[in-house]
Image (tube, helix red, strand yellow):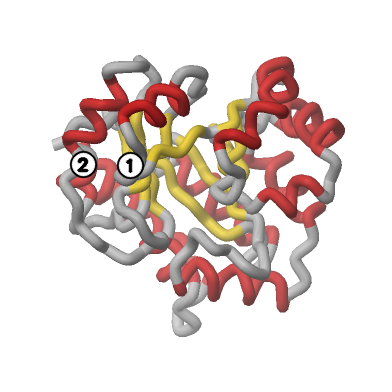
């Protein structure tokens, strides 16, 4: 069974909604939840997620909101934190990572932390059994892929193209998936540009997909009630989970 990772922006539009949505997604085929940490300059994210980030910050998001959401959600749904390094660094990683373990967080996704910089935190993550998700891009050389995936945990985040999330650009990922699998048995999940139309194609040769902008687009629809947003997100999750497992 191929896996579905769903990204949502934490505390947008509020904490209670995020908790309700997260738990509902967990019952609708989502295997892992990616709780996004709102940040003022989300450089890897497209316009939809960037807009949701800014709206969450305008509504007063604080890091403690992420912790409160996680405390309820993580015991029931496999949960990751996705954010930019400054957000985590300001919390003091030596304190934050053990706290993440206590909450039940299984890993962090930090797109602006280069692989070379992650090495100094390897022991901190390993000793707390919290994964620091590794990224591989289509532009990486075979030699670099070997280096990146050597100690990869949980899954490898394969960036579907060189760009930002939600762009919908298409690339042939089979050569790079083949390259990754020469060096590791860690599952490969494809992210960037994955939605209900592209999921079946993107997941070929991989073990899962990561979907963000397609869910956040629903969250941003101001004409929908909270209940309608949750219903539409859950329906989308079921469609994508079915598509990747046909």
Q: Quadrant of residue 183?
A: top left
Please tell me how crowded label 2 is: few (under 14), some (14-19), or many (20+) other residues with Cα within 10 Å: many
Quadrant of image for the C terminus: top left
- Relative depth, front residue between 201 and 92: 92
Q: Position of residue 58 (x, y in %)?
A: 72, 78
Please tell me how crowded label 1 is: few (under 14), some (14-19), or many (20+) other residues with Cα within 10 Å: many
Q: Position of residue 95 (x, y in %)?
A: 86, 33
Q: Residue at x 64, y 53 (%)?
A: 84
Left or right of 40 on screen, residue 30 = left
Quick check: 58 above or below 214? below
Q: Residue at x 81, y 52 (%)?
A: 64
- Determine which of the numbered discs, if any, sits on residue 173 in the image: 2
Quick check: 23 above or below 187? below
- Under tag 1, what secondary structure? strand
Res. 29 in view: no
Q: Residue at x 76, y 31 (%)?
A: 97
Answer with mark 2 or mark 1, whichever residue precedes in sequence.
2
- Determine which of the numbered discs, if any, sits on residue 190 in the image: 1
Instruction: Count up the numbered dots.
Output: 2
Find out whether the residues at labels 2 and 1 contact each other: C-beta distance under 8 Å. yes
Res. 31 in view: yes
Q: Position of residue 127 (x, y in %)?
A: 72, 15
Quick check: 118 above or below 193? above
Q: Position of residue 104 (x, y in %)?
A: 68, 29
Q: Quadrant of residue 213?
A: bottom left
- Determine which of the numbered discs, if any, sits on residue 93 in the image: none
């Amino acid at each position: 069974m191929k896996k579905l990772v769903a990204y949502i922006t934490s505390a947008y539009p509020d904490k209670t909604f995020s908790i309700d949505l997260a738990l509902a997604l967990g019952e609708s085929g989502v295997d892992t939840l990616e709780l996004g940490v709102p940040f003022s300059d989300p450089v890897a994210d497209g316009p939809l997620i960037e807009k949701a980030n800014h709206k969450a910050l305008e509504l007063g998001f604080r890091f403690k909101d992420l912790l409160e959401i996680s405390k309820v959600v993580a015991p029931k749904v496999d949960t990751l934190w996705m954010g930019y390094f400054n957000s985590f660094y300001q919390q003091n990683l030596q304190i934050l990572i053990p706290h993440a373990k206590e909450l039940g967080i299984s890993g962090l996704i930090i797109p602006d932390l280069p692989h070379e910089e992650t090495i100094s935190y390897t022991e901190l993550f390993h000793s707390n059994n919290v994964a620091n998700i590794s990224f591989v891009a289509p532009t990486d050389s075979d030699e670099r892929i070997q280096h990146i995936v050597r100690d990869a945990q949980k899954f490898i985040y394969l960036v579907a193209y060189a760009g930002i999330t939600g762009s919908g650009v298409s690339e042939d990922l089979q050569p790079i998936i083949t390259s990754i699998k020469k060096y590791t048995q860690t599952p490969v999940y494809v992210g960037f540009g994955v939605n209900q139309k592209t999921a079946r194609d993107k997941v070929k040769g991989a073990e899962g997909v990561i979907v963000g902008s397609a869910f956040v687009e629903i969250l941003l629809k101001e004409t929908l009630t909270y209940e309608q947003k949750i219903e539409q997100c859950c329906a989308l999750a079921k469609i994508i989970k079915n598509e990747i497992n046909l």
